Amino acid sequence: MNIPISKVKKEVGFRINLVDIIFITLLASASYYLYTILGSSENLYLLPLYVGFTFFLFCNVFRLRTKEEFVWTLFFLLSSFMTYTFFHAHWVAITLGFSSLLQAVLIGFAVRSSGYRGVFAKMR
C-alpha cells in the first residue's frame, strides 16, 4: 500500500532512538581513544564528538533540512582544509569556532522558518 508523501504526518519536536545513542557512544569513545593516543596538544580528539554533536542537533533537536546540513558539512570540510593548510598551529580551534558560528546561524534561520519541525515546534 503506497501512501502519498503529502498524506504522511510529519512528527515535530525532539526525537532520539537507540541508533542515536549507539552513535553518540561510539563518537565519545573515538574521541576518548584519540585523546589517549594524541593527547590534548592539537585538540584533534574533539573532532569526532563535535561533528556527531552537530548532526545530533541538526537531525534530532532542531531537525534542519538536508540543504542546511549540506551547507554546514561543506563549510566544515572547506574550513578544515583551509585552516589546516594556512594556520596549521591552531586549525582545530579556528575551524570549530567558525563552524559553531555557522551552526548557530543555520539553527536560527530554521527555527524562524515556516516549515520548522524541531524542538518546541508544537508551541508555535
Image: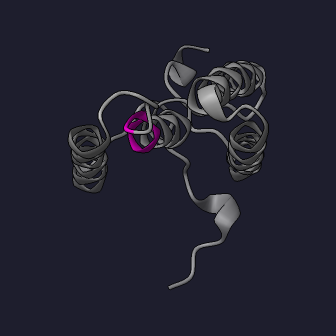
Quadrant in the picture for the C terminus: top right
Most distant residue in the bottom direction = 1
Kindly tell me whether residue 102 is visible in this rendering: yes
Task: Find out whether residue 30 is within the magenta segment.
Answer: no
User: Is residue 106 or residue 16 the one in the foreground?
Assistant: 106
Q: How is the image coloured?
A: one colour
Task: Find out whether residue 48 is within the magenta segment.
Answer: yes
What residue is rendered at 55% in x and 51% in y? 9
* Coordinates of residue 95 in the picture (x, y in percent): 66, 31
Kindly tell me whether residue 21 is visible in this rendering: no
Q: Is residue 90 above or below residue 56?
A: above
What residue is rendered at 40% in x and 28% in y? 41
User: Is residue 107 or residue 35 the one in the foreground?
Assistant: 35
* Coordinates of residue 57 in the picture (x, y in percent): 49, 33
User: Is residue 17 or residue 115 the one in the foreground?
Assistant: 17
* Coordinates of residue 79 in the picture (x, y in percent): 75, 39
What residue is rendered at 66% in x and 35% in y? 88
Q: Toward which corner of the image does residue 89 lie, by quadrant?
A: top right
Total numbered labels: 0
Q: What stretch is highlighted in magenta?
A: 45-49
User: Taking 107 as reference, is 35 left or right?
Assistant: left
